[in-house]
Structure formats: structure tokens, C-alpha cells
Image (cartoon, rainbow, N blue to C red):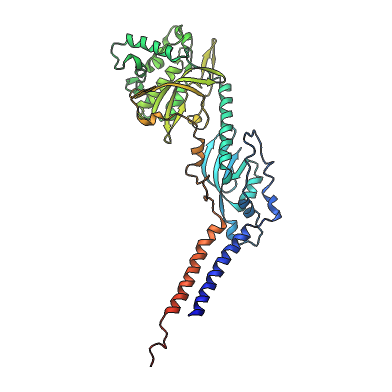
Amino acid sequence: MRNLALLSLLVLILVFSSVFAVHELSSLKPASKEQIGNLSEHTRGRVHDGSVNFISEDTADQISSPQDVPGPIKEIKHNFVIELSCPLIVPHEELRRVEGESGTFIVARILVKNVPNLAKNECVVKFGDEHAIDAFVGYVRNKLKMESEDRIRIQQMQKTMGISSLKEVKKELARYAEEDNVTKYPPERYYQAFVTPYDDQIKSLSYKKTREEIFNYVQGKMWMSDFNLFGVKEKWIKPAEFLFDTPALGANPLEESVSDCSEKANTLASMLRASGVMQDSVRVALGKVNFNGIIAGHAWVEIKEDGKWMVLDSTAGPYFEAGVKHERAGLPYKYWQSHEYPIEQVWFYYNDIYYVEGTNESAPSSWDAVASTNVNSLLLEGSSAGGSGSANTGFGNLLLPLVVIGGIVVFLVFKESVSPSPLLGRK
């Protein structure tokens, strides 16, 4: 019995010794770490938070482990954050992606044996293992912010309202309310009357269109200031008037639908609502923005995508200014999901059902959230990156099966030790 107990103890010692021996092999620090490339120099472009090229010691050791380390070590997968200038051909499992104008940012799972190829790949601008995720997200946010600032400047997006204060807007809307004898909205929130999803022309125009198709349609309409069109700083008209009546106005030299940001925003929200977007998931925002240092009143739309508010600004398309028509391709539907939109102040949110203005509101609590870039969630949610213990290690992979085997051996030995001896009971 004593011998069997000693044998059991010996088996356990051997099992755990083998586990830790393999772990030590995978943690060797050989001189061949250069195989992963000179990461500090493997970078291009502008860096804000220092180089985010980073491989932790554990990962680097596994990458450059000597050839006599057991095969499973080389088959370990880690999460990597990568900036790409072209498609990645290194075998990988993509978990998350954010598209920028100058490149793509991904979180991917890659076998450690393939990381030397990752470091040498010409498409890889920057990369790091999951321990670099916080620095990488900060880097991506800053880079996309620079892209949006450049885009605002290049697109000349400062196509704002003719008035720049909430007081002026309210005064103008109160005047419209006095002239409208059939409106269901009180003068203090008459802005809701300009979201018209139940208008027959708007319903017909929106029928079976996707969100992106509607956005592209409205973005493609010509921006023109109210002063050019009506001879006043600001004048609101309803979506159907904008789309179907402005081409015939005598002051319109283009004979096509034209108006400024308020009509574009109200029309976009109206068509989205008419297409089936629920009243709690789309809203017009009126406030101030900072377009390349120009702070002015502006109207834009916000819509829920992936559970978060995302900006849709439909004024990035063609515009008419100083007697000249300028063609612009506009921006993609989800551009402002990852790029920072320069909101200075929000005066109020509204659609045909809900509104929020200061402490006065009729909207659900979800309207309390503000639109913002979602780089963190786009890169982190569902990727298992950024959390402790999310990468596989050689020790973790080998520990469980070896412990199970050791347990089975101990159980069999123990069972044998307590089985009745054939000599017991003999007289």
C-alpha cells in the first residue's frame, strides 16, 4: 500500500514536471529574436502615441523558439492588431476591421510561426500583439481624426446654415408656425413639422430603398445657400418642396433640386423613416460644428448602427457657390462611424415623433447618448482582444490534457491498490 502511494506521488511529479519543462522551453530567450524583424523601424506614416509596433516577450520567445521545441508550441495562435496598406496574404483569421482612407486596421488571430512573415510583409504598416491593443486603438483614433480633418478641408464641407445661434433658429421657426394653420406641433418645437415620412411623394421615393441608397440619394442633391435661393439668411422648406419644387424656382440657375443643410437633414430623416427606420433610431440634430476652424450652425442626421448613434452628414456632395457648380463624390455611408465628426454643440434633436431640447423631451432614454466614433467597439467587441488571458499560451494548451492524463493514471493506481487481494479470506 505504501509503495503504491509512493508510485502515485511519483506519477504526479512526473506529469507536472513535464508540463513545466515544456513551458520553460517555450520561454527560452534565444539570440534569434531578430527573426521577427526590426519592429521599431518597420513603420510608415504619422505616429502620435509613439510606435505601436510591439511584441510581448512571451510571444517573441514563442516565435523564435528553437526547432527542438515540441510542435504544438509553433501552432499556438495569438491575437494581433495590424495596420494594412493592402490586403494581407499571411494566413490569418480576421476578427474585427475598421476601414480608413489611407489603409485598413484589423484584429486577427495568427499562428506564431507565421509572424516572421507578418513582419516582412510589405502590406503591413504596423502591428503588435494583443498587449499593444490600447496603444493601437489610440493610434487608430488619432489617425482617423486626422483623416476626417483632411477630408473636411478637401471637401470644403463648411456648407452650414445662414444663422449661427439657437435664438435665431427659434425665431425663424416661430414665424413659420404662425403661418401654418394645420400643424399639430406647438411653435416652440415646430421643427418637427419638417420631418414628413407620411408625405405621399416621400413614401413613394423611399419605397424599398436601403439606408445607404437613401443617404446617397440625398447626398447627391445640390447644396445651395438660402441667400442664393431665397435672398434671406435662412429659410426652411419641407422635403417635398425641396425635392420637387425648387427646380422650378426663378432664382435657381440649375433647374434641379437645391437647398442647404437643414433641408438635406430633414429630407434624409423623412426618407429613412418612410423606408421603415423606427422613430427611436433616427433623428435630426441641430447645433454647431467646427469645420476646419469655422464654427457655425448646422443640421445633420444621426442614426443607430450596431446599437450606437452614428452621424450622417449629407452635405458632402455637390454644391453651388459664387455662381459655380462644384461636383463632389461625397462620403461613404459609414464614414462617420469610425471618423470623428466635429460637433461643438447640439441645440436639439428631433424627428416627427420625438424631440429633445434641453430638459424638455419626449424621446426614450437612448436619445440621451451622443453620436461618437466607435473605434474601440469596432476593434474590440467580439474579438477577445484587449482582455487579460485572451491569447492562447503553450502552458495553457498543454496543462489540461497532461493533468487529465495524470489524473487517470493516479485513479487506476489507486483503484488497483484498494481491490480485494485473492489471498484475503483464505483460511
Q: Is residue 86 visible?
A: no
Q: Nearer the viewer, residue 293 or 121?
A: 293
Query: Does residue 282 sit above or below 116 in this rendering?
Result: above
Residue 180 lies in quadrant:
top left
Q: Position of residue 176 (x, y in %)?
A: 36, 10
Residue 302, horizontal then vertical, whole percent: 43, 27
Which is nearer the eye, 426 or 136? 426
Q: Residue at x 51, y 46 (%)?
A: 387
Percent of width and height locating residue 352: 34, 22
Counting labels gives 0
Residue lying furthest bottom: 427
Residue 310 visible in the snapshot: yes
The extreme front residue here reads 2
The quarter holding residue 20 reads bottom right
Q: Residue at x 31, y 17 (%)?
A: 185
For residue 44, side relative to residue 226 (left or right)? right
In the displayed structure, 298 sits above or below 278; it is above
Asked whether 347 or 112 is in front, the reply is 347
Q: Is residue 206 above or below residue 111?
A: above
Whole-percent x, y for residue 11 in the image: 53, 72
What is the quadrant of the C terminus in the image?
A: bottom left
